[in-house]
Amino acid sequence: MEKKLVVCPYCASGCKISFTVENNKIIKAEGANGFTNQGELCLKGYYGWEFLNDTRLLTPRLTQPMVRYRKGDPFTTVSWDEAIRFASSKLMDIKEKHGPDSIFISGCARGPGNEANYVTQKFARAVIGTNNVDCCARVCHGPSVTALEKTLGSGAMSNSIVEIEDTKCLLIFGYNAADSHPIVARRILKAKQKGAKIIVCDPRVIESSRIADIHLQMKNGSNMALVNAFINTLIEENLYNREFVENYSEGFEKMRELVSKYTPENTAEITGLDPKMVREAVRMYAAAPSATILWGMGVTQWGQGVETCMGLSNIAVITGNLARPNVGVGPVRGQNNVQGSCDMGATPGQFPGYQSVEDPEIRAKFEKAWGVKSLPAKKGIPITEVGHNVEEGKLKAVYIFGEDPLQTEPDLSSVREAYEKLELVIVQDIFMTKTAMQADVIFPATSWGEHEGVYSAADRGFQYFEKAIEPKGNVKPDWEIHSLMATAMGYPMKYKNTKEIWDEMRELCPLYYGATYEKMAGLGYVPWPCLTLDDPGDQWMYKGNRFATPSGKAQLIASDWRPPLDQVDDDFPLILSTVREVGHYSCRSMTGNCSALQTLADEPGYVQMNTTDAQELGIKDEQLVWVESRRGKVISRAKVSERTNRGAVYMTYQWWIGACNELTIEHLDPYSKTPEYKYSAVRLHKIEDQ
Ligand code: SF4
């Protein structure tokens, strides 16, 4: 028996797991004493590894390369040489005929790790010659990255997860930690036990609201109005930190003018909240000696996600709750390595280390290091605009790496139609996902547990994870597959291991230069910025109140509230919002193949609804129902309770039967291109009615 130390791949809390391994099988998982989890795990950490031992569970693991020689043909199992030959020659033909920007490459925010994402974006930029590379950050915390880069200079949590328990006030906005990040939820609980005040802004009764001092149970779609009312009250009641504003920020007067009409009283109709309660919450936040704002996809997955994140940043800035321990802004990233895939430049506008593709000096640095004459200067397209670009005839091929857009993108029928028109779909994954089923080429990859590398936790902490077992089947690590493709396309890529990739990346990224494998060994945790070899990394950012913006000052940027795009009416009277399920992760390809997790929730998923709404529709708890929007119709099972607010229903997005993204609207945030998953008009019927 031996012990192997890995990082849990099921959320960006970054918990360290100690596996006991015998005869190439994992026997058990225990919480290791990692920086964030300190020996604790949630049930996904304890039970989310079963598929690593058995490749024949519900959905078979992909264990052989496969090719579909003609559209409509069945898959043929082929050798790696043949799969690489077929895929690379097809890609080269498409590049030759339609140009490099006719190809889109995805990064992967899940199990592969940072090294694989570094190689992916290098493959896109240096080999294909396009910035059309993106990852699922686009559909979750893209707005947080865009907003915080603009306001504070760095698109990430300002402070670490462990500091949450020592803050004196938590403002939790559109974030259900108990379902999304159970170990973060433990920190919230500990903060409460240590006397912190807790304010929750959420339309539903969630676990955090049960321990909250104030629960602002706002109407769906009112985020920006409530944030503006918060800022308005801070200013008009003189509760802000004048000295911090004057010395360390810019844009106060313009922001003050814009929010002047958003008093709690004026916004009550939009938010549905008692103005007195809003004022009480603002005073509670302002009175705390240290305060932290946590937010999740209840803030970001809106057509106005970026502006709302900038508003939350404004609240932290004008109260001086930044640039010291136990305060700050906390967009808690969802997928385990979504911070990392952004850190590694798997985004259309930035090289690794958040260096702009539009900057000629930065491009020259990467051109020299990568040995290419020129790199593309124009920003690429985001993953959420793949469909439109296919429809417009601009995009001909996609190479999807560890993502499942045919399950996770909004308005799935239009995404399916677009994928059917593509000349080439390459999928690199560990399971036969819905996207893989529509592929022309399948590259079977190793899973977490079967390879090593580095993940970035939500709080910017780099952590190394070991390979625990030898993979089963004819599979390869993701970075090796991309390297084989690059070599076949005339750009030799011959990395020996992940360390070699990591060291190449560090040399090109001043922000991460000091984060060596040696520093991350064992239980090591190295947050960026980590500029030198003797720098331990910054657990909290903006030391000396110096922000990472061009002027060094925090930017205060306010925006008017806009209503959601889809509107409820007599035909579609309920609001559908997508949410998370504690037992399952992302598109469920991994957790759905672990029996302990599968017993917690199985298909069809639930549609959560309010008791009174259910009574009016004659729907009983657990009854099968149709849920229908202007875009599609799915079967689900009603979960009726008082925890859901009236007029809204909530579904998780991972089910094949009852896939709620058949119903969601595409409406994208204009800046981050993130879809408005949180507001689609729907109607419900009992199955017997049909
Ligand atoms: Fe894994 Fe997240 Fe649970 Fe930690 S909180 S064990 S990282 S799923």
Image (spheres, grey):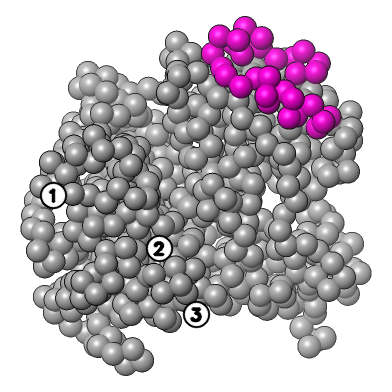
Label 2's element?
loop
Residue at 45% across / 24% down in the picture? 549
Q: Which callout, 1 or 2, points at the residue further toward the start of the chain?
A: 1
Q: In the rendering, at what x and y percent does residue 144 appear?
A: 53, 40
Instruction: Say what amino acid the circle numbered 1 marks.
Output: Lys
Residue 246, disc:
none
Q: Residue furthest top?
A: 243
- Res. 92 image quadrant: bottom left
Q: In the rendering, at what x and y percent does residue 370 appear?
A: 14, 46
The answer for how far apart the CA atoms under marks 3 and 2 are is 18 Å
Q: Residues within 10 Å of mark 1 (few under 14, many from 20)?
A: few
Task: Determine whether 127 is above or below 328 in the image.
Answer: below
Q: Which callout, 3 or 2, points at the residue further toward the start of the chain?
A: 2
Check if mark 1's residue and mark 3's residue have beta carbons within 8 Å.
no
Q: Is residue 509 visible?
A: yes
Q: Is mark 3 within 8 Å of ligand 1?
A: no
Instruction: Say what amino acid the circle numbered 3 marks.
Output: Glu
The residue indicated by pointer 1 is 373
Q: In the rendering, at what x and y percent does residue 661 appear?
A: 59, 68
Residue at 63% across / 52% down in the picture? 303
Check if mark 3's residue and mark 2's residue have beta carbons within 8 Å.
no
For residue 8: magenta? Answer: no
Label 1's element?
loop
Left or right: where does residue 345 sit relative to residue 270? left
The answer for how far apart the CA atoms under marks 1 and 3 are is 37 Å
Left or right: where does residue 592 sit relative to residue 630? left
Residue 403, disc:
2
Task: Determine whether 682 is above or below 463 in the image.
Answer: below
The residue indicated by pointer 3 is 417
